[in-house]
Image (tube, grey):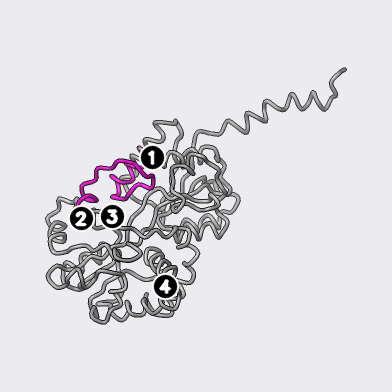
Amino acid sequence: MKPSLFTILLVLALPGTLAAQSAEEPVVNLYSARHYQTDEALYANFTKQTGIRINRIEAGDEQLIERLRSEGQNSPADVLLIVDAARLAQAARLGLFQPVKSKLLDERVPAAMRDPDGEWFGFSSRARILVYNKANVKPSEVASYASLADPANRDRVCTRSGSHPYNLSLIAAQISHVGEAKAESWAKGVVANLARKPQGGDTDQIKAVAAGECGVAISNTYYYARLLRSTNPDDQAIVAKTGIVWPDQGGAGTHVNISGGGVLKSAPHRTNAIRFLEYLASDQAQVDFADGNNEWPAVKGVSVKNPALEAMGSFKSDRLPIATLGRNTAAAQKIVDRVGWR
């Protein structure tokens, strides 16, 4: 039987089609809100291992999300890395990610630190702690997040804006634990106890505590860890005047957030993008996350030797699934607006 003309054309076309599907340009276009210089080693190691070059654009979470919305299907970006669960959830709601099926990622990234639909994955974690002035405040007076709203701590509290993603995620966790009404009552109490108008970042809050401008502040762990590792005499003086509390050790545990990312829906280099995410879950990359920015690895069992994290001690973390925080972020923002935590 002679082959039909259609069959001949199909056979001739097939090799080229397969080549187009499998031979991606050796590049990953990365949009990253991780503005940490220490991540350079992370990216360099990936290229060394795979030969895949990383083109990177860095900006804030909101700027990158807005850029992706503007670019639409014409976006050149393959991967988006963001430093907060609330923003990851926002990107997912906007339809920016595509589901990724990866046995490696499912096995290495704990279920509580990834999207149930496979749209994003957490690769490192940080905790939201309380930093207090040793001369003016006893640790027992600020042993929980609830204590920040206690009238006994009037004019003692310093925080950054409640609308910042780190605080929105904390409020979202409160909503999950106690309900929206009680979470709003708590946020109102925090605002009533502020020593000054919210301003600056977490490091600014720590400095204000050391200076006696406030008695207690909310901060991500890695900001305090940087001061612990610093050889600058001014930073050492700040550490000497302050102490840390792991909140809610007798209850739900200390609030934990993540840094994570996903493959974008319009990714032109999808295979390489997935390979990059899988690399971020490797032992080497997990150690780079921990050593470089004083974060904890997402992957269990990865051995990390970080003197600052070790000095801060162990703690009981909140086991709330990270995806839950994203679902409560909109309600958290409304609470911030109503109580004036700006």
Label 2 vs 4, first from the N-terminus: 4
Which percent across, then down, holds residue 240?
12, 60
**Amino acid tagged 1:** Tyr
Q: Quadrant of the C terminus?
A: bottom left
Return the residue at label 3: 222
Return the residue at label 2: 227
Question: Left or right: where does residue 13 sit relative to residue 3?
Answer: left
Q: Secondary structure at mark 1?
A: helix
Asked whether the residues under the numbered discs 4 and 1 touch, taking CB atoms below 8 Å apart as contact, a structural biologist would say no
Above or below residue 109? Residue 272 is above
Label 3 vs 1, first from the N-terminus: 1
Q: For this rendering, which residue is in front, 64 or 145? A: 145
Rounded to the nearest whole Å, what is the CA distance between mark 2 and mark 1?
A: 25 Å
Asked whether the residues under the numbered discs 2 and 4 touch, taking CB atoms below 8 Å apart as contact, a structural biologist would say no
Q: Secondary structure at mark 2?
A: helix
Q: Residue furthest top?
A: 1
| Residue depicted at x 53% and y 34% | 25
Q: Given this view, does label 2 or label 1 mark the residue nearer the observer?
A: 2
Q: Given this view, does label 2 or label 4 mark the residue nearer the observer?
A: 4
Rounded to the nearest whole Å, what is the CA distance between mark 3 and mark 1?
A: 20 Å
- Magenta segment includes 310: yes
Region rendered in magenta: 284-311
Residue 178: image tag: 4
Q: Given this view, does label 3 or label 4 mark the residue nearer the observer?
A: 4
| Residue depicted at x 37% and y 35% | 45
**Amino acid tagged 2:** Leu
Q: Secondary structure at mark 4?
A: helix
| Residue depicted at x 36% and y 42% | 286
Rounded to the nearest whole Å, what is the CA distance between mark 3 and mark 4?
A: 27 Å
Label 4 vs 1, first from the N-terminus: 1
Rounded to the nearest whole Å, what is the CA distance between mark 3 and mark 2?
A: 9 Å
Question: Left or right: where does residue 292 sit relative to residue 209?
Answer: right
